[in-house]
């Protein structure tokens, strides 16, 4: 490609419908990128033409005096380099600016991504716990369970199979489970078990067999009816007060 791209369009900057400029440049597709209000970059326009020999990425810059001009982005990876760790070259999607480390994964992603309008990928702020930490706040919806299983799986990624260009969604990578650990937890220490750790063939069969066995053991424990412990004085007073309020709603505070 020559180092100069001449497009004479008025008014300036170009309206969206003239970004493509298909009549004067039938062999070139154009995408336009600009700064996002929250920082980073966002796609202002993505060419609808997918199979043209050449593709040009332009960066729209606006000055404080509202002046605007375009910059040719020759290396899209350098523009979005801050989104990844490390310095190895990656392949960047022209439709969402998401970087990929391998060309194979990038090409499979583009088949689906180009079906949609330009996307803006936003990353959480690692310095802000409210953005990067997932918390449970609906404490009123909690229900205490006497037993629960804590499980941890070990897996590795393998490339997906049977990528269909017609489908809107395809599996890019698949998690292959290679091991697990399962630990029965209870508020009663005498019923809490040691973690079972397994790694080997038939991982999921082993896991399901263990879960069903745990279900039988827990069901047997719960089937053993026992008398309730005597209520403390404070608990008895609370129950009597609650029953009184239910019997005489008008006396409730």
Image (cartoon, rainbow, N blue to C red):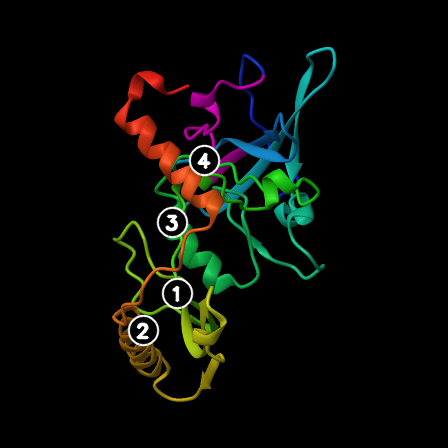
Discs 2/1, front: 2
Tell me if 217 is positioned left or right of 118 in this view.
left
Question: Residue 133's x, y, as percent?
Answer: 59, 46
Tell me which numbered mark, 2 or 1, is placed earlier along the sequence: 1
Q: How many marks?
A: 4
Residue 11's spot in the image, x, y percent? 54, 12
Query: Do the residues under discs 2 and 4 have CB atoms within 8 angstroms?
Result: no
Tell me if residue 74 comes above or below residue 17 in the rendering: below
The label on residue 94 is none
Q: Position of residue 3 (x, y in %)?
A: 66, 41
Question: Is 127 colored magenta in this rendering?
Answer: no
Mark 4 to mark 1 CA distance (whole Å): 47 Å
Graded by Cα atoms within 10 Å as few (under 14), some (14 to 19) or many (20 or more), the crowding at tag 1 reads some
Which of discs 3 and 2 lies nearer the camera? The answer is 2
Helix, strand or loop for disc 1: strand
**Quarter of the rendering occupied by the C terminus:** top left
Query: Position of 106 compared to 69: left or right?
Result: left
Label 2 secondary element: helix
Q: Residues within 10 Å of mark 2 (few under 14, many from 20)?
A: few
Front disc: 4 or 1: 1
Q: Are marks 2 and 1 in contact (CB under 8 Å)?
A: yes
Residue 5 place in picture, x, y as percent: 60, 34
Residue highlighted by disc 4: 118
Q: Is residue 51 visible?
A: no
Q: Secondary structure at mark 4?
A: loop
Residues rendered magenta in the picture: 13-32
Label 3, on which residue? Answer: 143
Q: Which residue is the site of mark 1? A: 147
Residue 221 marker? 2
Q: CA gap, disc 3 to disc 4? A: 43 Å
Say whether disc 2 or disc 4 marks the residue closer to the N-terminus: 4
Q: Which residue lies most toward the right here?
A: 64
């Amino acid at each position: 490609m020559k180092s100069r791209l001449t497009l004479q369009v008025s008014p300036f900057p170009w309206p969206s419908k003239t970004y493509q400029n298909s009549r004067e440049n039938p062999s070139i597709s154009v995408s336009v990128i600009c700064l996002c209000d929250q920082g980073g970059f966002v796609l202002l326009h993505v060419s609808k033409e997918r199979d043209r020999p050449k593709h040009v990425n332009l960066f729209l810059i606006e000055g404080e005096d509202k002046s605007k001009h375009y910059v040719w982005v020759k290396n899209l990876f350098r523009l979005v380099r801050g989104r990844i760790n490390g310095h190895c070259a990656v392949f960047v999607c022209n439709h969402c600016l998401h970087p990929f480390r391998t060309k194979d994964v990038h090409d499979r992603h583009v088949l689906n991504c180009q079906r949609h309008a330009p996307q803006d990928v936003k990353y959480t702020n690692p310095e802000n716990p409210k953005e990067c930490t997932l918390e449970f706040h609906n404490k009123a919806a909690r229900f205490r369970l006497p037993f629960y299983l804590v499980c941890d799986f070990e897996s590795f990624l393998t490339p997906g199979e049977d990528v269909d260009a017609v489908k809107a969604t395809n599996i890019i990578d698949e998690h292959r489970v290679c091991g697990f650990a399962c630990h029965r937890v209870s508020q009663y220490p005498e019923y809490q078990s040691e973690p079972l750790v397994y790694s080997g063939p038939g991982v999921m069969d082993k896991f399901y067999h263990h879960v069903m066995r745990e279900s039988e053991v827990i069901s047997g424990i719960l089937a053993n009816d026992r008398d309730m412990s005597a209520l403390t004085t404070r608990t008895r007073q609370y129950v009597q007060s609650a029953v009184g309020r239910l019997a005489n709603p008008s006396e409730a505070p």
